Amino acid sequence: MKKFISILGSTGSIGTQALKVIQRLGYTVSALSAFRNIDLLEKQVRAFRPALVSVYDETAARELRERLKRFKDVTVLSGKEGNLAVATEPTADMVLTSMVGMIGLEPTIAAIRAGKDIALANKETLVCAGQLIMDLARKKGVNIYPVDSEHSAIFQCLQGKRNNTVKKIWLTASGGPFRGFTRDQLRHVTKEQALHHPNWSMGAKITIDSATMMNKGLEIIEARWLFDVPQKDINVAVHPESIVHSMVQFEDNAILAQLGVPSMEIPIQYALTYPDRVETEDALLLDPFEKSLHFERADDTTFPLMSVCRKALDMSGLMPAVANGANEAAVELFLNDVIDFYQINEAVESSFAAFSANKQTYTIKDVIEADQTARFHVYAKYL
């Protein structure tokens, strides 16, 4: 059956790869959103002719309207309302949520409420509001298909689970650009070094999260909600080759792993075509003779943000949103040369002591307020 897809964050790394997959599959693009990259968004509109596009930045949206004025069948919106419209565009069967950060939370909720299946690449949605999101998806009968390579790997390994018990989940991590560094070495790394990932081509924020290992901490939280596994049963193994994308260990101690080249196209495609598998191009073929596979213990002393995320998950309630909000603010300051690399750790760790309004029963409004409080704490600390 031909599918109609809306993409939140079409000009980012996941969004651009998703459009390549969609073109290969012959699916239809219903709507697209971007932050402000209208040069690329204009090319996407001309290639895929969605009925609706949104640009978060109003000034950029006005310019795009002018550029597309000859396309009478394309509506250009802006701001939060534009993102919500893309998320709920009536013809879409599925919404790919690939926006980076908390900004993706409300559009994802809107899409679920509208009954759209979700291809989830915005990890902050489950990190900050996992219980609410999963409860809402069940209530609305909506499927959530993971796009992150690690969670897609787990999802694929679980397809043969039947009634068998999962003993452990093993998230793999490349180790980022600073694998093997000491704490002292990390205090002197540069932004350019942090943005140079050895295996993956990603946006700046996610690349920095990989360098601090915060990305893996966020994935622990996300995995807890996606797969209903307690965090004590979610382990991390550093795997420098990024070939084994994650593993599942069953009660008989058998471990199933999903392997593939370090490309997001395969997990994106599987989320869009599930339960079917569709042929891909030869460039995505893994040659098993090409590399040896190595695994190391994750160093959560040198990279403490994984432990911080585990602590947030143990405290539950709003604390994962606090950790995520503080991290987003700290990474922003680092990318703008306000703080150094290791201060990202300090900013996130200190946010817990600054937040005293944790709730075990909470609303989306509470999540947003916790996020804003954490950001304010970081900005006040360093600006």
Image: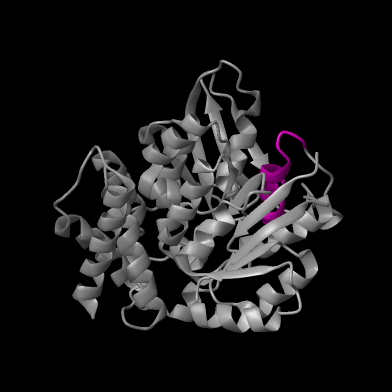
Q: Position of residue 265 (x, y in %)?
A: 71, 54
| Depth check, front residue: 199 or 227 | 227
- Is 184 situated above or below 348? below
Q: Quadrant of residue 229?
A: top left
Indicate the quadrant containing the C terminus: top left, top right, bottom left or bottom right. bottom left
Residue 35 shows in this picture: yes
Q: Residue at x 57, y 77 (%)?
A: 61
Indicate the quadrant containing the N terminus: top left, top right, bottom left or bottom right. top right
Q: Position of residue 17 (x, y in %)?
A: 70, 61
Horizontal relation, residue 49 to residue 227: left or right:
right
Extent of the magenta region:
259-276
Q: Quadrant of residue 21?
A: bottom right
Residue 179 shows in this picture: no
| Depth check, front residue: 354 or 252 | 354
Q: Residue at x 70, y 45 (%)?
A: 272
Q: What colour scheme has been applied to the protein in the rendered image?
A: one colour
Horizontal relation, residue 21 to residue 373: left or right:
right
| 102 inside magenta stretch | no
| 269 inside magenta stretch | yes
| Depth check, front residue: 254 or 80 | 80
Horizontal relation, residue 224 to residue 38: left or right:
left
Q: Residue at x 23, y 62 (%)?
A: 373
Residue farthest along the front direction in this orientation: 72
| Depth check, front residue: 57 or 203 | 57
> Number of callouts in the render?
0
Q: Quadrant of residue 188?
A: bottom left
Residue farthest along the top direction in this orientation: 163
Q: Position of residue 153 (x, y in %)?
A: 61, 41
